[in-house]
Amino acid sequence: MDTTGNLILPPSGSTYAPQVDALLTFLTYMSLFFIVVIFGAIIYFVIRYRRRGAEPEYHRAPAHNTALEIVWTIIPLILVLFLFVWGFRVYMRMNVVPKDALEIQVTAQKWFWSFTYPDGATSVNELVVPVGRPIKLLLSSRDVIHSFYVPDFRIKRDTLPNRYGITWFEATQVGEHDLFCAEYCGSKHSAMIGKVRVVSDREYREWLETSATAGEGLPPEEFGERLYTSRGCINCHSLDGTPGNGPSMLGVFGSRVQLTDGTSVIADENYVRESILEPQAKIVAGYQPIMPTYQTILRDEEVNALIAYLKTLSEQTTTGE
Amino acid sequence: MSTMEGQSASKYAEPNYLSATRGLKSWLLTLDHKRIGLLYLISTTVAFVIGGIFALLIRLELLQPGGQFMTSDQYNQVFTLHGAVMIFLFIIPATPAILGNFFLPMQIGAKDVAFPRLNLASWYVYMFGALFALYSMHTGAADTGWTFYTPYSTETTTSVISMTLGVLILGFSSIFTGLNFIVTVHKLRAPGMTWFKTPLFVWAIYATAIIQVLATPVLAITLVLLMLERAFGIGIFDPKMGGDPVLFQHFFWFYSHPAVYIMILPAMGIISEVIPVFAHRRIFGYKAIAYSSLAIAFISFLVWGHHMFVSGQSELAAAMFSLLTFLVAIPSGIKVFNWTATMYKGSLTFEPPMLYALSFLFLFAIGGLTGVFLGVLAVDVHVHDTYFVVAHFHYVMVGGSVMGFLAGLHYWWPKMFGRMYSLFWATVALVVIFIGFNLTFFPQFILGVRGMPRRYFDYLPKYEDLNVLSSLGGFLLLIGFGMVIVYLVLSLARGRAAGANPWGAATLEWSVGSPPPPNNFEQTPEVRHGPYDFDVVKPKRTYP
C-alpha cells in the first residue's frame, strides 16, 4: 500500500500508482531541498548582514556574478528537463492501454456514473472490476464535462459530451476505492461520487451473472427501492417531501401534477414511465428541464420495479392521513 | 536627483496633489495619474472586501461535511463570485492600476502617463464592468466557476451573460491601462534614463502591459462567442449545436494563463524595488531580473495547454506544453535567486515592506515549486482539479501577488499620503496574515494529494480535520487583513509626517516631497545614476 513511506499520500491501488508516488516523493524532497537552501541563505544573510549601527551603511556589494548566474540557471534547467522526461514516461504508461484490457464504458451525466460491461451488464455509481487485470475505460458524457477520478489509482480523465476519453488502470488488490467527479458540473457536483469495487476474478464473474438477473426472486417494490438508490434517483428526488433538483416522490404516484405549460396530468404508470425514459416531455411546474434520460440505463423490468416502489410511497401517505 | 536635499526633509509637503484642487468633481474628472491611482485603490479595496466575504462564506460552509447554512447552488455561486471578483476586480487591476499608475510615471521622471484621458476612461470602464459583474448577483449570480467552462456555462440558468459581459468590459479597462503604460515607458522617460537605468518595477509593469494588450483581446473574443452561443444559439462550443467544448478551454487558457503573469509580474517588480532599498545595496543581477520579466511574458503565451492534461488533448501536445511549462519556471527561479543574493553583504533593516517582501519570497517559492509538481505530466493527472491546485494558486496569487502588493502599498504609502502608518501594528498584522495564510492553504496541499476535488460543496468525513484547520486559518486572515485596513486608514489622520524619503531609496519618486506635487517634478529630472546605486547617492532617511 504505502510503499514510499510518504505519510501524505492516499493508499496506492493501481499498478502505476507507485510510479506516480515515486515522482511525487522525489518532488517533495526536491522542494524541501530548495526551500532549505534558499531560506538557509536568507536566514543567514538576515542575521549576518543585519544593520549594526543606527544608520545603515552603504557597502559596495557585487552587482552580479556571471559564473554564479549561469550555474543557478543551468542546474534548475537540467533538473526540470529530467523531471519532464520522467513525468512524460510515466504519463505514457498511464495512457497506452495494454492490448488484453477488459473494456468498460463509463457514462457520466448529472449527477451519476453508469458503467456498461462487455456482456451488457450495467451498474450505477459502482464500478466492479476484477483484480490484476488491465481495465480499459471508454469515457463519455451525456451532458456537460465531468471527470472520472479515483485518487487511490492516481487516475483522472475528463468525460466529454462529443468524444471519447480513453484511459486504463489495473487494480492491484481486492478492496473498495472512492470515485469522484473532478470537473465542476453544477448543483450536485460534490454528490457525484461512487465506488470502485475491486474483486477477485471469480467474484467478478459471479457479479456479472447476478447483475444480469438482478431483481429475480425479489418483490418488485423491494427491487425498485434498491434501484431508487443504486441508480441515483434519490440524488434529486427526495423521499420525505423536500424539493431537490427535482420534485420529491413522496405521494406523487396517483396525484395530479401541475406542469410548466399550465396543464396538469395524473401521475399514473404511463406518466412515470415517460418521465423516466423521456424526461423532457412533461416538466413539473417550478422545476428545470435538467433530468437526463434513462433510456439505455434501465431495463424494462427495472422501470416496472421503480413504478411499483413509487406506488408504495403514495400508499404510505394515504394511510398516514 | 539632488533635489532631495532642497525639500524640507521630514514635513508634510505642500502644495501636493491631494490638496491642489478640492471637491468631488476634481476627483471624478481628474487627469492626474496619482489621483486615478487612488480612485483605483478605493474601488479595488471594495472589491477585495467583497471577494473576501465570499471566501469566508466558503470556509464557513466547509467547516464541517454536509450542508451548513447554504444550499449547494448557493455555494456554487459563492465560489464563482469569490474567484471572479478576486481575479477580475482585484488582483488583475490592483498593482498595475494603483501602484503602477501612481509610480510608473514618477519612477521614469514623467509628469503623467502618455494618455491621461485614456487613463481616466479606464477607471470608468472598470467601474462600469464591475457594476455589470456584481449586478449578476442580483439576477442570480453565475454558478460556472470563474473559468466559465462550456457546455455547462451554455446550459446553466444563472446570469452568465451579465457576469461575462462584466468581465469583457473589465478587459477593456485592462487593455487601456496596458497600452498607456507601454507608450509611457517608450516615450516619456526622463533624459538620461536609458533602459538599463529604468527601475525594475517599470520593467515588470512594462512586461505585464505587453501581456495585457496581447492576451486580453482573446478573452474578449472568447466571451463574445460564449454570449452569442447562449443568447442566439450559435454553436461554437456546445456539442448539441455542433460546437466543441474543449475549444473553449483552449481559448480561455490562451488568455488566462498569461493572465496569471499579469497578476504576478507586477508583484515581482515591487519585490525588486523593496529588497535593495532595505538591504541598502544595489540589486544583484539587474539585467537578469529585467530580462526574466520579458522571458516570462513571452513564454507565458505558450503554456496554456497545461490546464488540459486530462481533457483528452493528444499526448504530443501534452508533452510540448509540459516542457514549455518547465521552461517558464526558470526565469521565476532566477528572480528568487537574485533577490536572495541581493541580501548578501547588505545592511538589512526590517520595516514592514521588507517583512512583506521576505514573506513573499517564502510563499512564492512554495507556490512556484508546487507549480513544478503540476507541470510533471503524470503527477498532474492525479492532482489536477483537486485542492492541490487550489493551494498552489493561492500560494502564488495571495502569497505572491497579494503579499507583493502589500509590500508595495506599505513601501509607497508614506509617499502617497505623506504620513507613516504604525510600524508596530503593521508588523503584528503581517505575522497574523503569514500564520493565517499558511494555516489556510498548506492543509489544502495535503487534501489535494489525498484526492479531495475542488469546487466541492460537501466532502467525505476523511477530509474533515484538514478542512477545519483551513477554515481556522481563514478567520486569522480576516483578522490580519482587517487590521491592515484599520491602521492604514488611521494613519491618514494620525500618522506622523514621513518626509520625502522615509526609507532612503534612490529612485526618482523619492526625490520630491510627500505627498508629491501635482505635476510630480518642478523641472524634468536628469538621471545620472542607476536606480539602486545607493553607494553613490548615499540617500538620507527622512523617517523617523
Image (cartoon, coloured by chain):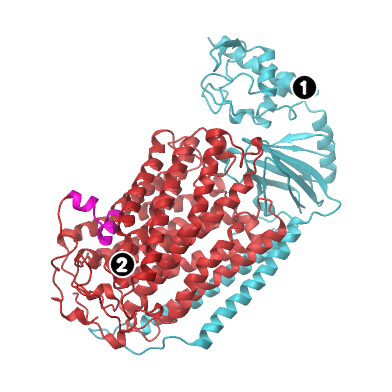
Q: Which mark is residue B103?
A: 2
Question: Which residue corresponds to mark 1?
Answer: A300
- Relative to A284, residue B423 above or below: below
Residue found 36% across the figure and 81% down from its top: A47
Chain of the residue on which disc 1 is drawn: A
Q: Secondary structure at mark 1?
A: helix
Image quarter for residue B254? bottom right
Task: Give the residues drawn in magenta, as a range.
Answer: B24-40
Name the colour assigned to chain A in the rendering: cyan
Q: Is residue B251 visible?
A: yes
**Viewer-closest of A84 and A11:** A84
Magenta segment: does it hold B416? no
Instruction: Name which residue type carries label 2.
Output: Phe
Image quarter for residue B104? bottom left
Image quarter for residue B534? bottom left
* Secondary structure mostly seen in the magenta stretch: helix
